[in-house]
Amino acid sequence: MSPPIKSNDAVRTTTAPPIAMRVPDACRFIGLSRSTLYLLVATGEIETVKVGAATLVLTESLCALIERRRNTPV
């Protein structure tokens, strides 16, 4: 049997969004199609990083896009 956990021994768990994600995950995260996501990348509205063969989409860039569009009148 393991000893009881004291309050200072407890491990804090936090869930933070990832810094970057692959394209399919980014599409699900933002709710857009793959082709729309790539159009936004091509126009510079979403930032990506290449690591080897992987294309990673920066989470901060996705959040910034939503914030910009949220504050833009229709």
Image: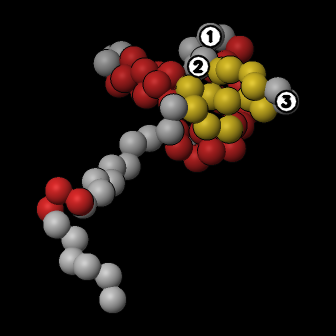
* Marks 2 & 1, CB-CB < 8 Å contact: yes
Q: Is residue 69 left or right of residue 47?
A: left
- Front in this rendered view, residue 14 or 58: 14
| Mark 1 secondary-structure assignment | loop
- Front in this rendered view, residue 47 or 32: 47
Which residue is under mark 2? 46
x, y (%) of residue 37? Answer: 66, 29
Q: Of marks 3 and 2, which one's residue comes earlier in the chain?
A: 2
Quadrant where the C terminus sits is top left
What is the distance, in whole Å, between disc 1 and disc 3 at their CAs? 20 Å
Q: Is residue 8 left or right of residue 72?
A: left
Residue 22, disc: none
x, y (%) of residue 33? Answer: 67, 40
Q: Which amino acid does label 3 sit on?
A: Ala
Q: Residue at x 37, y 49 (%)?
A: 15
Which residue is under mark 3? 53
